[in-house]
Image (cartoon, grey):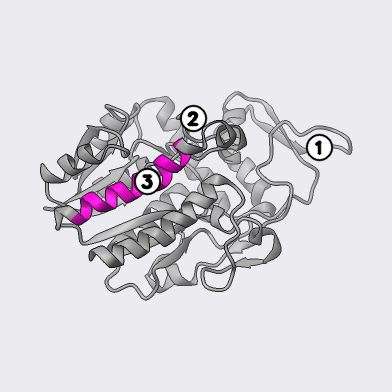
Amino acid sequence: MDAILVTGGAGFVGLNLVEALLARGEHVVVFGREAQLPSPAPSLFARLPGRLEVVQGDVQDGAALRDLFARRRIGAVFPFAAITAGPEREAADPALVLDVNLKGVLATLAAARDAGTVRRVVLPSSAAVYGESAYAFPVLDEATTPPVPISLYGVTKYAVERAGLRLAGLWGLDAVAARIGATFGPWERDTGLRDTLSLHLALAEAAQRGEQVVLPPAPLPAYDWVYSRDLAEGLIALLDARDPPHRVVNLASGTDWAPAYGACLEALRRAFPGCRWRHAEPGERPSISWNESRPRGVMAIGRAADLGWRPRFAPAAASADYAAWLLAKREQALP
């Protein structure tokens, strides 16, 4: 069986993807800075039918990547190692963000080209490529919404899209780019490489502490989230797609979650009874920092639907599943 390489596989999205791949019996190779996956992933993943290898290395090291491909037959690649930089890190070390997010992907593609065994590359793009357009368009469409990235992270992701697809075509690699929406769910944690963690993680941590959550005054700004389990299934749909009609595909819920935050918090409250929540009074400060103050457009998911993928979890169901996962993780006995 050909192996599937996931660089950055110890990160948030990477762990969800690795878990889903192992669950269907794949041989998965995780390559990144970590010598092992965070607890309790090793014990959980050992129960799944697939085979897991963790190889420590740096995506900026071309020789290490070539050696990685030379020592095992790799049939597919998710080059997902990245730094999700905030403004302070962008200003302090822009070269590192570019080196990891863009040059690391290109080095991985070059090693895949030289190996000659790779049948599919799923490039890691992001909703961040839409940038200012996200506030100007009610629907964010892959073909008609102009990318105007604001952050250096968004700039690198758009560069990964364009340069990755271009080089894949020149080098005989079959690539597709996934524009990943704002994500939350199992395995999210502060790794030191993501400067902006999800709103849902902050809500879940407050719920577990039994604190009262004070939301901003209603109505809350429109925002499109995708649950991490749904995202993993969408990424696998891109892996499996034969002759995909589109090479850039949004992976998101296609839904404004703002009206559902109350239902999400109720799901957390049922799991963690000490949790309470309400909206702030005029002039009162919310207890949770909000990801956005401006309403954002919702990502279109018609292209993903053409590949047979739609998210399974509605907002309240996603929060309930997440709460159950958090409870099980607390007991170190995930299902």
Left or right: 131 with respect to 253? right
Mark 1 or 2: the one toward you: 2
**Residue with the mark numbered 3:** 103
**Can the viewer see residue 83?**
yes
Identify the main secondary structure in magenta.
helix
Location of residue 120 by image quarter = bottom left
Residue 98 lies within the magenta run: yes
Residue 229 lies within the magenta run: no
Q: Is residue 195 above or below residue 225?
A: above
Which quadrant holds the C terminus? Answer: top left
Q: Amino acid at mark 1?
A: Ala
Point out residue 101 in the picture as x, y percentages from the top left corner: 42, 44
Point out residue 71 in the picture as x, y percentages from the top left corner: 10, 42
Check residue 82 in the rendering and tell me which mark sits there, or answer none. none
Left or right: 195 with respect to 114? right
**Can the viewer see residue 24?**
no
Q: Amino acid at mark 3?
A: Lys
Q: Which range of residues does the magenta coloring cover?
A: 96-113
- Spot the residue most to the bottom: 245
Q: Amino acid at mark 2?
A: Asp
Q: Residues within 10 Å of mark 2 (few under 14, many from 20)?
A: few
Per the image, label 2 sits on a secondary structure element best described as loop
Residue depicted at x 39% and y 68%: 247
**Residue with the mark numbered 1:** 280
Residue depicted at x 64% and y 48%: 263
Instruction: Tell which of 208 and 70 is nearer to you.
Output: 70
Residue depicted at x 48% and y 50%: 156
The answer to whether mark 1 and mark 2 are in CB contact below 8 A is no
**Residue with the mark numbered 2:** 190
